[in-house]
Image (cartoon, rainbow, N blue to C red):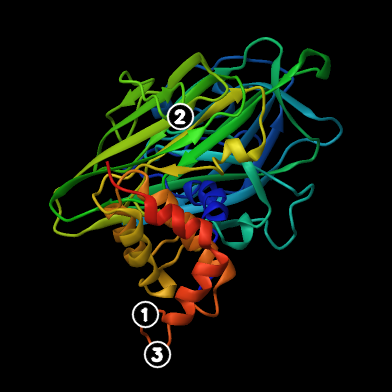
């Protein structure tokens, strides 16, 4: 039986999202890089000037002269004709002193609409990993050292200064990961450039550390020629202030709504944030306060006019997403930033017992591995009503960890009496909670 830890799977969702944005590209001019760089190589410049905002039009990218920040990270790549490309590469911040970031900016040539910047646990770029690498699923070798998101955006240019006294400290010599995703549907290759600018200050000016969050729904099933919805809830463990936020979904998405409920049982009617443009949605610009004990609830609506079912996944052509991300302060544990205590919103009509049985009868290879989830699991979850899915996942997680041997399907058949006995003994609480659940 394939081992399953759903909550660990969600913690890996950020890695998948790093390589999952979508774009439609047209030929463009190649902007000059800041500093000297080969086309596929990273560039880091340490500029003495300081800028807390950034102007200009990404459609006429004229290089480093128009993009002046204390630290500039650059990634150049060429996207082959008729290709969807997920690429990432290591870059390194200057040595000698920590980088105290008080403002972020970015600029990329038209054609992509998304990139992310990741922190790693490295202080030197491995000599055998100095190039660019495919990172479609986020579990490739280059992502093995990734820790958390630092910054991201999906508009061609922008700047986000942090409030006075707030900063994000990146240790000296830290290795970061830049990533981008292009979908070039043209007959010619396109050269592209992504730049990230970090505006910095001295350590004594940073009293409060900022962080970045990413909430990701791994369960999406949009049948052929149909409309559907997906979404989830993430609890807020402490008072936090949102500096900015952005949504992400693919081209079948028609709307994403975000609510901040005062408590799980008290949903509010008015959304905190709404976007309807999948390719270049408006960013939310704070400040806005999320209070301790509140719940962030988000929902994506889809309209699939194609003759093929669409499930959750990284590719713009064949899959969908539902993501909320942003920058906030004061920094909280990763359990908040990656929503370890994720709750799935159920839009179906099936109660927990039937949902759990459905999951148990799925092929073992369909169980989540990271956020690669097979179609059987997606179908079972999509059919579950609100409240059913969470309990079914808790039961499935218990069975996977406590009854893996007893519940391994034999000869392709469904688990038998030994599995039922093990569940009743080792997963009794989860089994009872599931059996008692009824759909609203």
Closer to the eye: label 1 or 2: 1
Is 352 in front, or is 277? 352
Q: Secondary structure at mark 2?
A: strand
Q: Tell me the quarter of the picture where residue 360 sits.
A: bottom left
The label on residue 333 is none
Separation (CA) of disc 2 from disc 3: 44 Å
Is 99 in front, or is 422? 422
The residue carrying pointer 1 sits among few (fewer than 14), some (14 to 19) or many (20 or more) residues within 10 Å by Cα, namely some
The residue carrying pointer 2 sits among few (fewer than 14), some (14 to 19) or many (20 or more) residues within 10 Å by Cα, namely many
**In the rendered image of this protein, does residue 110 appear above or below residue 228?**
above
Residue sticking out furthest to the top: 164
Looking at marks 1 and 2 on the same chain, the residue that comes earlier in the sequence is marked by: 2
Separation (CA) of disc 1 from disc 2: 37 Å
Residue sticking out furthest to the right: 96
> Is residue 438 in view from this perspective?
yes
Residue 182: percent from left, percent from top: 40, 47
The label on residue 414 is 1
> Is residue 85 in view from this perspective?
no
Residue 127: percent from left, percent from top: 75, 60
* Residue topped by disc 3: 411
Residue 86: percent from left, percent from top: 46, 53
* Residue topped by disc 2: 296
Measuring 82% from the left and 19% from the top, which residue is drawn there? Answer: 203
**In the rendered image of this protein, does residue 102 appear above or below residue 281?**
above
Measuring 50% from the left and 69% from the top, which residue is drawn there? Answer: 423
Separation (CA) of disc 3 from disc 1: 9 Å
Residue 117: percent from left, percent from top: 58, 39
**In the rendered image of this protein, does residue 260 appear above or below residue 421?**
above
Q: Tell me the quarter of the picture where residue 236 sits.
A: top right
């Amino acid at each position: 039986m394939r081992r399953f830890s759903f909550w660990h799977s969600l913690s890996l969702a950020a890695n998948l999202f790093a390589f999952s944005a979508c774009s439609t590209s047209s030929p463009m001019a190649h902007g000059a890089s800041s500093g000297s760089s080969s086309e596929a190589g990273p560039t880091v410049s340490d500029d003495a000037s300081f800028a807390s905002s950034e102007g200009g039009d990404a459609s006429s990218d004229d290089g480093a002269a128009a993009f002046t920040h204390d630290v500039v990270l650059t990634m150049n790549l060429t996207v082959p004709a008729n290709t969807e490309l997920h690429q990432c590469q290591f870059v390194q911040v200057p040595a000698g002193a920590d980088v105290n970031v008080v403002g972020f900016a970015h600029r990329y040539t038209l054609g992509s609409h998304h990139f992310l910047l990741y922190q790693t646990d490295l202080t030197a770029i491995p000599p055998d990993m100095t190039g660019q690498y495919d990172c479609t699923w986020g579990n490739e070798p280059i992502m093995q050292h990734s820790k958390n998101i630092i910054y991201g955006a999906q508009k061609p240019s922008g700047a986000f200064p942090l409030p006075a006294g707030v900063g994000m400290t990146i240790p000296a010599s830290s290795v970061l990961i830049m990533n981008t995703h292009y979908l070039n549907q043209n007959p010619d290759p396109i050269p592209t450039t992504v730049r990230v600018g970090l505006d910095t200050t001295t350590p004594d000016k940073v009293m409060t550390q900022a962080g970045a969050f990413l909430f990701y729904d791994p369960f999406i099933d949009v049948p052929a020629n149909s409309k559907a919805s997906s979404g989830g809830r993430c609890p807020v463990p402490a008072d936090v202030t949102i500096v900015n936020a952005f949504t992400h979904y693919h081209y079948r998405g028609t709307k994403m709504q975000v609510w901040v409920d005062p408590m799980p049982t008290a949903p509010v009617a008015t959304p905190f944030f709404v976007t309807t443009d999948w390719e270049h949605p408006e960013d939310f610009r704070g400040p806005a306060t999320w209070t301790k004990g509140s719940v962030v609830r988000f929902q994506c609506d889809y309209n699939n006019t194609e003759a093929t079912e669409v499930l959750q996944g990284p590719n713009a052509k064949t899959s969908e997403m539902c993501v909320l991300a942003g920058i906030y302060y004061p920094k909280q544990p990763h359990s908040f930033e990656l929503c370890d205590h994720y709750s799935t919103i159920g839009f179906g009509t099936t109660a927990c017992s039937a949902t759990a049985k459905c999951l148990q009868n799925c092929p073992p290879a369909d169980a989540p591995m990271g956020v690669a989830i097979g179609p059987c699991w997606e179908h079972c979850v999509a059919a579950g009503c609100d409240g059913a899915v969470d309990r079914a996942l808790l039961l499935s997680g218990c069975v996977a960890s406590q009854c893996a041997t007893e519940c391994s399907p034999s000869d392709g058949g469904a688990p038998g009496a030994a599995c039922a006995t093990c569940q009743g003994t080792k997963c009794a609480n989860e089994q009872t909670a599931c059996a008692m659940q009824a759909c609203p």
